[in-house]
Image: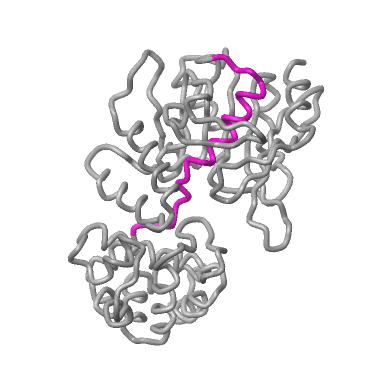
Amino acid sequence: MKTQPQSGLAAFRAALMLPQVGATGDGNDGVASGPGSYDTVVGALRAFADDERLADLVMTAWGGRDGFPTDHTGPLRLLAALRAAALTRRDDHPLATELLLDAVAPDPDGRLREALADPELVDWLRHGPIRTVDPARAAAWGLASLVLGLPHRGFDLVERHAGAGLALVVDRTAIGFRMGTHAVQGFDFPSPERRDGFDTTPIPVSGEDAERQVRWLHACVWPGERDRLARLKATLTHRQASWPGQSPPAAVHGHASTDWPALLADVELLAGGAPTRPQLLLDLSTPGDGPPDPADLAPLAHPQRLWLRHVRTGRAGDRALRVEAVLVRDGADVALPLAEVGYHGTNLTLDLSGPARLRELWAR
C-alpha cells in the first residue's frame, strides 16, 4: 500500500522532532549524534520543518513514490544527502564547515537555506536508505573464531545483508577490539578461506558506479565519528585493492532471496560442492528482536555450521546489542549469548558462560 504524499510529508516533519534524530545520542542505523556540529545542523533543520523549500525538496524526492520514509530514517537520509553533496562540492558547499569538519560557522540557518536549494539533493535523497556500514560488527565472527580455535583458512564466512562486504575483510586490518580483558586487532582473527556475502542490493566498491556508492557510505557516517570513519576506510582499502594470496577474494553477490537455504545453495555452486570446512553464517547489519526464525534453523542441521547474529537486548533505552551464537545439537537448536557490545562499539563485555558452552557443544 502506497503512503499518501501529504501524510508522508506530515510524518517527515514529525520525525524531525523525534529523539532518535536529536542530540541525545540515540541516532539509529546510520548517521548518529556527533560531538560537534550535528546538533547545530539538526536544530537548523527543525527550524525549517514548516518551510516550503524543505517541503518542496522532500516532495520532489519522495512524493508519490513507494517507500516514502515516515519514521526517523527520513531525516537521517536528508542529513546523509546533505553530507554527500558536501563531499562532492567540498569547500564550495555552504555547510562545508559543519558537514566536513564537524565544526560550526556563523549563520547556519542562512547557509542551510542555500544548501537545501542544491539540485543534487534530490538524487541523493533517492539514492537509497541509510546502510549500517560499521565493520566493528565483525567482532561477532572474530570472537567466535577465537573461542573455537578455528585455524587459519580452515573455515568459511557467509554473510547475508552484507552491503559492501566490509565485515568480511576485518582480519586484514589493524582495527582494534577489546574482548573482555583482552585487546585484539583484526589481524589477530584467523582468516577464512572463502568470504561470500549476499544482498538484495549489494553496494559495489569497484566499477562504474563505485565512486558514488563509496561516497554514500562515507555520507552515512558523521564527520565527528572518527573511529567509524577510520574503520570504514580501512576495510574499503582491502575491498577495493587487488586481492593477495591464494584464497578466493571477498565478494558480495546480488540475490533476490534472503533465506539461508537459498543463499547456501548458491555458496555450494560457487565453491563447487558441499562445505568441507566449518561455515560461520553472519547476520551483522540488521539486529534481531527475538528468538531465531524457525525458517533460518534448517541449515544448522549441518554440524559444522554456526549462525552468528546481533540481537537487541530489549532493555528500555538501551541500544547495546547481544552477540548470539546459534547451532543445532541433538536435534535441538541452542542460542548462546557470547557478549554484549555498543551499537557501534568495539568493546565487548563477554558473557560468563556462553563462550565455554559454545566450545563444549561445538566439540560434539
Q: Can you say whether 73 is above or below 56 in the image?
A: above
Q: Residue at x 52, y 78 (%)?
A: 17
Please tell me whether residue 149 is drawn above or below residue 222 in the rendered image.
above
**Quadrant of the rendered image containing residue 297:** top right
Where is residue 71? Give x, y as percent: 53, 69
Q: Residue at x 59, y 37 (%)?
A: 178
Please give the name of the residue rendered at 45% of the width and 59% of the height, measured from the top-left corner. 31
x, y percentage for residue 36? 42, 65
Residue nearest the viewer, comparing 223 with 194: 223
Position above or below: 114 against 176: below
Q: Which residues are magenta?
A: 127-151
The residue closer to the viewer here, 93 or 13, is: 93
> In the picture provided, is 189 more to the left or to the right than 253?
right
Residue 37: say if magenta: no
Quadrant where the C terminus lies? top right
Looking at the picture, how far across and down is residue 175, in whole percent?
Answer: 46, 35
Image vertical order of residue 246 relative to residue 88, above or below: above
Instruction: Name which residue lies at 30% across and 77% down.
Output: 112
Work out whether residue 24 or residue 241 is closer to the camera in this orientation and state it: 24
